[in-house]
Amino acid sequence: MSEELQTVYDESARCNKCGFCQAVCPIFDITKDERSVARGHNALVRKLIEGDLELDPEFKDPLYECLLCKACVENCFPGVLTNKIVVKGRSEYMQQVGEPRMMHFLFHKLLPDQKKMAKYIRFLAFGKNAGMSKMARSLGILKWFRRDLDKAENIVEKMPTRFFRDRVDSLQLLPEKPVTKIAYFVGCGFNFVLPHCSEATLEVLVGHGAEVVVPEHGCCGLPAYVYGDLEAARKMARKNIETFEGLDADLILTECASCSSFLKEYPEVLEGDPGWVERAETLIKRVKGFSEYLHDKLPDQEQDPGESVKVTYHDPCHMCRYQDLKKEPRELLQKIPGVEMVELAESDRCCGAAGSYNVLHYDQSMRVLDRKMDNLKKTGAEVLTTECPSCCIQLGYGVRRAGLQVRVVHISELVREKCRTVRAAGP
């Protein structure tokens, strides 16, 4: 047994099978299947390492049904890192069974090269906006590619054909009196699906005195990592480290909770290669999320009761559990004029997006989302805000699906809309 597998085995063996993970697992709440919960995952991976389990759908399906939300880890008395055990289980499956060609192409050719990725996404966007995907759905063609794909086609209403990187040259990136220099890490979700969120982020940063540089870089590597292609994730990590370590910038900022979380995990992703680990550790000291950076820099502003709006906040899993960032977005929201903050029950419970989970496991994802929408209705909020592109897309779909009159916005959009001092200082 390799040292890496031994580490995973020892970690899984720390599970004392108490069952506390059952109460907090969104998927077990739906399936009531022991294989869907943390102690089930730990047992499966342990049996795989021991050689007592065959690599068949009974092993694969439960592992890939996991949201990797870390709710089980947060509620585990011994603190078993089930999320990492699941990822390693997926990795072993891919190594032994083989990775589908389409996924290999995505992780090794497209995600590292955003220009190449843009060509494919733009082609899909034109097709969707022209109604081709709806036609394919009505004919049942999408089911040929994936069982749930025809159901998930409407999660994104409309795709932009001009992405954020296409718009950068038209944006103001230099304030009159710069006080700091920020290297902006563009998340794939914001670049290709929600470019207006990135524009809001940059306007706020520049308005707050930051000179912003937008380097050419690839995906952070998280999609490949969670799927189990660890080598692709490591390649993307190394490439991004090379790109950002040479930049003259005070910090690296992204408004994507998933990106900031995974960037901070680079030392662990590259474990076993001391030179790269050291470079990664140096890099992550400069990595910040949007509210993590701005929450103590935005000045307190006078509230105008006549313009108040009721706002609630959804905690992305990659912020609240992976980075322990819970108070920062709330402190930021409390400084925004005209915002009446109301807490969302189970605000840190996964919304069911989990990257592409809502596409690959549509029915389960929607049942997780329904619970989030039920909690949202009780707040009476007019605006739901968060800090993750997958969450923005999923929650926006949930609001449309439930027929709620609620706006879903990224927190940077809310700051741009409501903060007069930032807006006045911006472009």
Image (spheres, grey):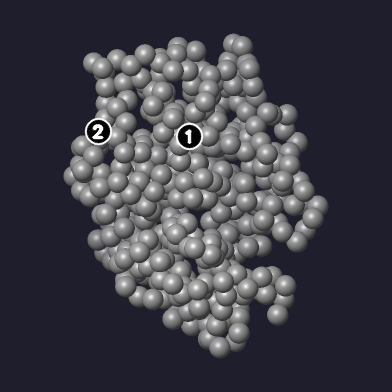
Residue at 53 percent across and 86 percent down: it is 53
- Above or below — where is 2 with respect to 320? below
x then y, percent, for residue 253: 58, 34
Q: Is residue 355 left or right of residue 398?
A: right
Outermost residue on the left side: it is 403
Q: Which residue is mark 2?
A: 382
Q: Quadrant of residue 419?
A: top left
Circle 2 or circle 1, nearest the eye: 1
Depth order, front residue of 353/303: 303
Outermost residue on the right side: it is 275
What quarter of the picture does the N terminus occupy? bottom right
Mark 1 secondary-structure assignment: helix
Residue 145 numbered tag: none
x then y, percent, for residue 322: 52, 50
Depth order, front residue of 146/389: 389
Q: Examine the rendering and report whether any part of residue 387 can be seen.
A: yes
Mark 2 secondary-structure assignment: loop
Q: Quadrant of residue 23?
A: bottom left
Badge 2 amino acid: Glu
Q: Is residue 241 left or right of residue 305?
A: right
Residue at 60 percent across and 84 percent down: it is 50
Badge 1 amino acid: Glu
Q: Quadrant of residue 340?
A: top left
Q: Which residue is mark 1?
A: 328
Depth order, front residue of 272/410: 272
Total residue callouts: 2
Q: Examine the rendering and report whether any part of residue 65 can be seen.
A: no
Residue at 62 percent across and 51 percent down: it is 265
Q: CA distance from mark 2 to mark 1?
A: 21 Å
Q: Is residue 401 left or right of residue 299?
A: left
Query: Are there few (<14), some (14-19), or many (20+) residues within 10 Å of tag 2?
Result: some
x then y, percent, for residue 134: 28, 54
